[in-house]
């Protein structure tokens, strides 16, 4: 379990502020100057600020930095579709400008001030929390993390919730714990490398288009 990779994504516009501050902050803190471009749905963000965390340090989901166990999450799909469909009153830029910050479960556990894991979308009332790594390993639907399709089916109406299982870091994570940075294409690789100039991660910015949906406008 400790060797599992976990993925946090943010907009490229936020990279400079994140690494200048030396921390990836939870939603509540990031709103106070660390987020230049917000990509999350406002209603979902608000629900996460109210949803109690029933394990570990407690508090609300908004007090934690969210990581997923795989790329191409349902949340990223929604962002890509909002762009494709020109949905009004949403972040319009799509998923291509998003940047993945990667670390491992073990690094997060050892370096963070606290953590909890979930078996699904942390904002959903039926989702369970734990601060026990062994229990978390059993709770997460690992085959679903790598499945090409994660939509609900008539036989299983809970697939989408489970695909959004999260590893939540309490309050903030030191950027020194980030192992790799993932981007959609060469253009964004060059952009991120310029923003990280002088940082050891400059040489660890990798291009992974298959981690994205990448939909264009209709």
Image (cartoon, rainbow, N blue to C red):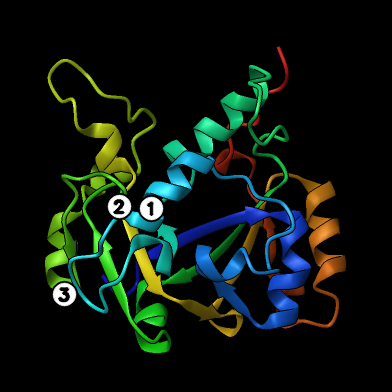
- Give me the residue at 69% from left, 45% from top: 184
Classify residue 24 as left or right of residue 183.
left
Q: Position of residue 177 (x, y in %)?
A: 53, 81
Q: Earlier in the sequence, mark 3 or mark 2?
A: 2
Horizontal side of residue 24 vs 19, given as left or right: left
Q: Which residue is mark 2?
A: 122
Q: Please say if 119 is above or below 179.
A: above
Q: CA distance from mark 3 to mark 2?
A: 16 Å
Element assignment for label 1: helix
Q: Nearer the viewer, mark 1 or mark 2?
A: 1
Q: In the image, residue 27 lies at what x, y percent?
A: 52, 62
* Label 2 neighbour load within 10 Å: few <14, some 14-19, many 20+: many
Measure how far apart labels 1 and 2 are at the Cα level: 7 Å
Q: Nearer the viewer, mark 3 or mark 1?
A: 1
Sequence-earlier tag: 1 or 2:
1
Labels 3 and 1: the sequence-earlier one: 1
Residue named by callout 3 = 132
Q: CA distance from mark 3 to mark 1?
A: 22 Å
Q: Position of residue 32 (x, y in %)?
A: 64, 69
Q: Is residue 69 visible?
A: no
Residue holding disc 1: 48
Q: Quadrant of the C terminus?
A: top right
Disc sitting over residue 74 in the figure: none
Q: Check whether the beta carbons of the residues at disc 1 and disc 2 lie within 8 A of each other.
A: yes
Q: Is residue 168 left or right of residue 42?
A: left
Dividing the image into 4 quarters, which one contains the N terminus?
bottom left
120 vs 187, nearest the viewer: 120
Q: Residue at x 25, y 61 (%)?
A: 52
Q: Is residue 157 above or below residue 52?
A: above
SS of the residue under disc 3:
loop
């Amino acid at each position: 379990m400790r060797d599992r990779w976990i993925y946090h994504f943010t907009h490229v516009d936020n990279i400079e502020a994140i690494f200048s501050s030396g921390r990836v902050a939870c939603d509540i803190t990031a709103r106070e100057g660390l987020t230049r471009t917000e990509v999350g749905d406002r209603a979902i963000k608000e629900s996460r600020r109210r949803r109690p965390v029933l394990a570990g340090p407690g508090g609300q989901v908004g007090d934690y930095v969210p990581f997923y166990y795989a790329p191409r999450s349902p949340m990223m799909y929604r962002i890509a579709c909002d762009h494709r469909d020109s949905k009004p009153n949403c972040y319009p830029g799509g998923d291509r400008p998003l940047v993945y910050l990667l670390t491992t479960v073990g690094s997060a556990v050892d370096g963070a001030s606290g953590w909890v894991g979930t078996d699904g979308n942390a904002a959903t009332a039926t989702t369970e929390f734990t601060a026990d790594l062994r229990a978390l390993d059993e709770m997460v639907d690992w085959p679903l993390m790598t499945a090409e399709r994660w939509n609900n089916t008539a036989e299983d109406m809970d697939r989408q919730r489970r695909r959004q299982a999260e590893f939540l870091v309490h309050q903030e994570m030191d950027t020194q714990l980030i192992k790799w940075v993932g981007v959609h294409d060469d253009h964004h690789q060059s952009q991120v490398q310029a923003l990280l100039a002088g940082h050891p991660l400059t040489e660890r910015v990798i291009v992974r288009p298959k981690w994205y949906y990448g939909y264009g406008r209709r």
